[in-house]
Amino acid sequence: MIDFSDKLKKLREGRHLTQSQVAQQIGCTSSMISAYESAIRRPSYENLIQLSKLFHVSTDYLLGNDSKSALDTAMLTNEEINALASLISIMKNKK
């Protein structure tokens, strides 16, 4: 869980959410989210799963076992998924 606190904070800020908003959505307190981001506490399995669902990433990504984040494409058509894949490819080649 070396990178967990940093990843959580970056995901939260990337979605323009406050610690209170994240806490409310996963069913805990804002002080708990603060403790996670400060690496004072580690999340329970239940909160870890709720955080992964909220941010549409795997628990492995949050725990630092996987460097790739995942996109939730469940509600997209195949055409939309292909368009996203093309955009990602263009962005990767731009670097």
Image: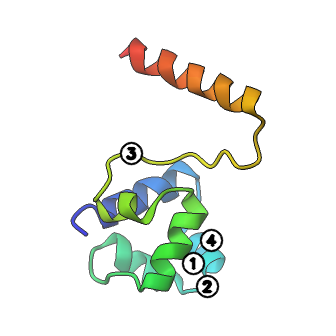
Residue 55: image x %, image y %? 55, 59
Type of amino acid at the residue the image marks with label 3: Lys
Between discs 1 and 3, the one toward the N terminus: 1
Which disc number belongs to residue 68? 3
Secondary element type, mark 1: helix
Which disc number belongs to residue 37? none
Between discs 3 and 2, the one toward the N terminus: 2
Type of amino acid at the residue the image marks with label 1: Ala
Q: Which of the two discs, 3 and 2, sits closer to the camera?
A: 3
C-alpha distance separating marks 4 and 2: 10 Å
Residue 1 placement: quadrant: bottom left
Which disc number belongs to residue 27? 2
Q: Is residue 93 left or right of residue 65?
A: right
Residues under numbered marks 3 and 2 in contact, where contact means CB atoms less than 8 Å apart: no
C-alpha distance separating marks 3 and 4: 25 Å
Residue 9: image x %, image y %? 41, 60
Neighbour tally class for label 2: few under 14, some 14-19, many 20 plus, Cα within 10 Å? few
Query: Does residue 8 sit above or below 44 in this rendering?
Result: above
C-alpha distance separating marks 3 and 2: 26 Å
Residue 11: image x %, image y %? 47, 55
> Which of the two residues, 38 or 11, is positioned nearer the viewer here?
11
Task: Give the residue pinned by disc 1.
Answer: 23
Q: At 57% across and 56% down in the image, what residue appears?
A: 56
